[in-house]
Amino acid sequence: MFQRNISLSKYSSYKIGGPAKYFFKAKNIEDIIKAIKKWRGFASYRNKASCTGLFILGGGTNILFDDDGFNGLVIKPDIKFIKQDGNTLMVGAGTPLTQLLNYSIIKNLSGFEWAAGIPGTVGGAVRCNAGAFGGEMKDVIVEVYILDISKSKPRIKKRSRSACCFGYRSSIFKKQPFGKTGEIITYVVLKLKDGNRKSIKKIIKRNIDYRQKHHPLEYPSAGSIFENTDVKKLNKNLKKRFISVIKSDPFPVIPAAYLISKAGLRGISYGGAMISLKHPNFIVNVSNATAHDVKNLIKLVKKEVYKEFKIKLKEEIVVF
């Protein structure tokens, strides 16, 4: 049932990562339940050293896999569907964001234009409360259906938007201990609004054009490495210092890219990884980079930005 020693670099937008000891692609919820039951049986007679946990993989676009891979089971829910009832959509967790965006254009549904150009899956976007151009995933979510595997018998439950505890690039799902998944996102219910196809397409084009102009899309990456800094967390002197660069995302923040640039880190490289000249909050894979290379640059950025501004940057991506 499980594949063995599958390279995670194949499932990473970074093109980085060692092998998953066990790997399974689930086409539906029943597949996930079967995999969980088999995994528990597997783990029951293996010592902890040989089975370190369970990881749920989305589109692999916001993650840095370790060079040593993952010594456990990786499940990739490949649940793809879109069902419509008026302005309400039920969407499978494995559905690509691009597919959902194209569907919204065809059906003249507005409210999701901010997601233009964001890679990955719907489930992954829910987990990290993905956002851009002033919008966030939580803005369109009604409820999230999850497979609760915390008990001996997995069961479907639903969480309202408020019960998902959405925060800046965060949710209750992202806060689950690494390798100890308790809830697996299976599908979500979204609420959009009536729109005009021409206007929707215009906004989407504008957002994609911006990404193509300002983001280093020519190299493998995991997108923005660090969260932008909430202005509320800064003292008065720092607020005054950065007042000209504050932007809404969707609340007032200092862009991490600005801090990295001002710390003089554009273009700095380590091994095959480089802090992008085009957008310094991207660490790009320019020449067969390893996770070790990227991690060293992450460490350098955090150190130098704190040294220069006394601001602690926090990773937005998941780092194994």
Image (cartoon, rainbow, N blue to C red):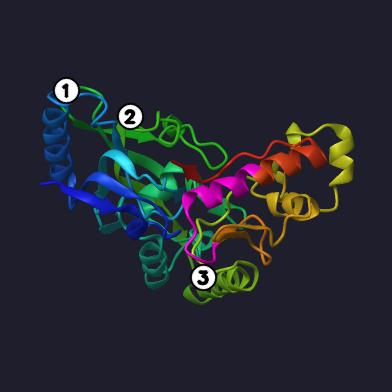
Residue type pointed to by label 3: Ile
Q: Badge 1 local density, few (<14 within 10 Å), some, or many (20+)?
A: few
**Real-space CA distance between mark 3 and mark 1, rounded to the nearest whole angstrom:** 46 Å
Q: Is residue 33 or residue 14 the one in the foreground?
A: 14
Q: Which residue is mark 1?
A: 152
Q: Secondary structure at mark 2?
A: loop
Q: Is residue 85 or residue 80 the one in the foreground?
A: 80
The answer to which of marks 2 and 3 sits earlier in the sequence is: 2
Q: Secondary structure at mark 1?
A: loop
Tell us which disc is closer to us: 3 or 1. 1
Tell us which disc is closer to us: 2 or 3. 2
Q: Which residue is mark 3?
A: 200
The answer to whether residue 240 shows anywhere in this view is yes
Q: Say if the magenta span includes residue 292.
A: yes
Q: Secondary structure at mark 3?
A: helix
Residue type pointed to by label 1: Ser
